[in-house]
Image: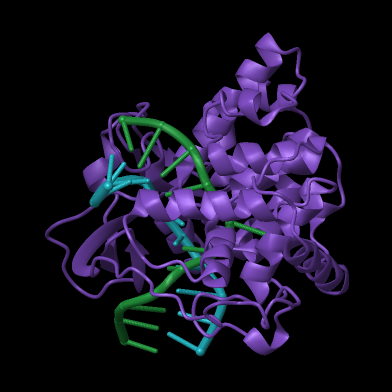
Chain colours: A purple, B cyan, C green
Amino acid sequence: MTRLGSDEAVLRRRLREWYTGHRRSLPWRETSDPYAIWVSEILLQQTRVATVIERYGEFLERFPTVCALAEATEAEVLTAWSGLGYYRRARMLHRAAREVCARHGGVVPGSAAALRELPGIGRYTAAAIASIAFGEAVAAVDGNVERVVLRLAGAGLSTASEVGRRAQAEADRLLDCAAPGEWNQAMMELGATVCLPRGPRCEACPWVEVCRTRGEHPVRKRAAMRAEALSLAWVVRRRPTREPVERVWLVQRDERESVMPLMWELPETDGASGEPVLRLRHAIMQVNYEVAIFAVEATAMARRSRQRREQWVTAEEAGRMPLTGLTRKVMQRLGWLPAGGGRRAKPDGVPR
DNA sequence: TACACGTGGTG
DNA sequence: TCACCAAGTGT
């Protein structure tokens, strides 16, 4: 941390003023509950604000306190997380909640250093929670902040670790220790709404006059996606009861899978014939799947009894299971699950 | 250090 | 259409 110069004082004042006029109203900005702020930070990891707005309230309603989350089963937590991706976040949040409930009596640790000890809380998230919920003077450097400070400083591209170190140093230097939580959010807000990765809106930036690069910032290219075909079986059977209930066949992924372990999905099928009942595209990581869903006769499954790793489920049961995003999407398209899982089908855009 | 980890919106 | 990429973490 260098001596406070007048330049920094001007920078701080300009961003604070800009933030006052451009701060978005977001649900997690309406609370001072450290647990709720923690949940928002985990949800927001690599996930769009609009998506998090849709799911934040219902997650907190389902798990209102750290101990409520701790007492839930992992399957229940994953069900609430279904469709959000990066499911390890949910597992780690759940484990961390159990630690906090068991070891800290349900009180969220009040410093960045202590938060950092919890699973799923890295350098950024620890700083974000500590500054926003507890007022600790630590700079939270996420992708937005990194982009903002590197453009501001005109730092060139080098190794990832050097970029990270430099960004942290710049953010530390700029931090407004009088109101670190507001400051960190203002920095992120600037990156998220003005200092955009592509097409930065420099004309709207409070720092345009002092910015070294005016938005120029090289971006690293990423690996190309590959295409792959995927055939899934849609196996439905009717229960011969007074009121026939349709059930679909789902299988559970192995716990040793690196991707989406223990989550439920439609079985794959190989020798599918005829026309699929549904075609869709679904991208997971580096793969673009061309997905075809085929109606398959139930007779093949008829003799198989209900096991832990494969079972017939009703639509209602499926809605209470941790489904993969693709399976959730297919079931919604086929009318088996309400679109948006009971949420708004089309979320409103977030105002800039 | 670089990569794996999910998904959906966007230009 | 499709590449880009969103309030990162763990290994």
A224 relative position to A218: left or right: left
Tell me residue A187's x, y (percent).
69, 61
Which of A38 and A256 lies nearest the eye of the viewer?
A38
Q: Position of residue A278 (x, y in %)?
A: 35, 72
Quick check: A245 left or right of A304?
right
Q: How many marks?
A: 0
List x then y, in percent, for residue A181.
78, 48
Residue A330: in sight, yes or no? yes
Q: Residue at x 14, y 57 (%)?
A: A270
Left or right of A18 in this view: A42: left
- Tell me what residue is drawn at x 83 percent, y 66 percent: A13
Q: In terms of image quadrants, where is residue A229?
A: bottom left
Image quarter in which the N terminus of chain A is found: top right
Instruction: Identify which residue, B8 or A271, lies in the foreground.
Output: B8
Q: Does residue A320 appear anywhere in the picture?
A: no
Q: Name the residue rendered at 76%, 50% in the picture.
A: A57
Residue A6's place in the image compared with A206, above or below, is above
